[in-house]
């Protein structure tokens, strides 16, 4: 998959160093993955939440942090929408938050 918006990951792990290793591991797996549908994501990440608008929510660091991505299955692209604490996640609408383009 082509992963777009990785600067959000870098900015977050500068703030929350404990998330760096897991976010780097997620990125390495995502860029090598072939996700053609939500089932492909769930097969690799059973705890991921598939939500509306082709969004997927991943728990990072045991659920302390959340990563929201928009998967464009047809184009083989994952766009990072949000990475934040669980409390920050609770204050947003995961289906409507604007996703990164860089």
Image: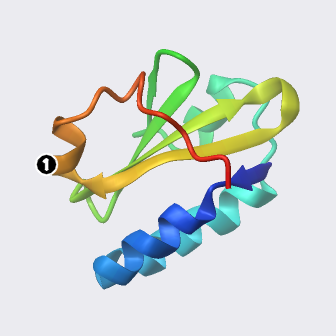
Q: Is residue 23 left or right of residue 84?
A: right
| Crowd class of label 1 (few under 14; some 14 to 19; many from 20; radius 10 Å) | few
User: From what the image shows, is residue 82 above or below residue 50?
Assistant: below
Farthest top residue in view:
52
User: From what the image shows, is residue 72 above or below residue 10?
Assistant: above
Q: Is residue 6 left or right of residue 37?
A: left
At horizontal 39% and vertical 77% (from top left) the residue drawn is 13
| Rendering coords of residue 1 (x, y %) | 80, 48
User: From what the image shows, is residue 67 above or below residue 46?
Assistant: below
| Rendering coords of residue 6 (x, y %) | 61, 63
**Which sits in the foreground, 77 or 49?**
77
| Rendering coords of residue 30 (x, y %) | 68, 55
At horizontal 62% and vertical 56% (from top left) the residue drawn is 5
- Badge 1 element: helix
At horizontal 54% and vertical 39% (from top left) the residue drawn is 99
| Rendering coords of residue 101 (x, y %) | 67, 47
**Which sits in the foreground, 62 or 69?**
69
Farthest right residue in view:
75
Quadrant of the image for the C terminus? bottom right
Task: Determine which residue is flagged by label 1.
Answer: 87
Scheme of image coloration: rainbow
Res 11 → quadrant: bottom left
Q: How many numbered marks have been drawn onto this rendered protein structure?
A: 1
At horizontal 72% and vertical 24% (from top left) the residue drawn is 37
User: From what the image shows, is residue 37 above or below residue 24?
Assistant: above
**Which sits in the foreground, 37 or 72?**
72
Res 29 → quadrant: bottom right
């Amino acid at each position: 998959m082509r992963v777009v918006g990785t600067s959000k990951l870098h900015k977050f792990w500068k703030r929350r160093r404990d998330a760096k290793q897991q976010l780097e591991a997620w990125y390495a797996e995502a860029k090598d993955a072939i996700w053609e549908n939500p089932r492909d994501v769930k097969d690799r990440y059973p705890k991921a939440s598939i939500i509306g608008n082709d969004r997927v929510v991943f728990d990072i660091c045991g659920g302390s942090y959340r990563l929201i991505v928009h998967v464009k299955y047809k184009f083989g692209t994952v766009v990072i929408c949000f990475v934040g604490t669980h409390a920050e996640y609770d204050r947003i609408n995961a289906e409507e938050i604007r996703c990164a383009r860089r």
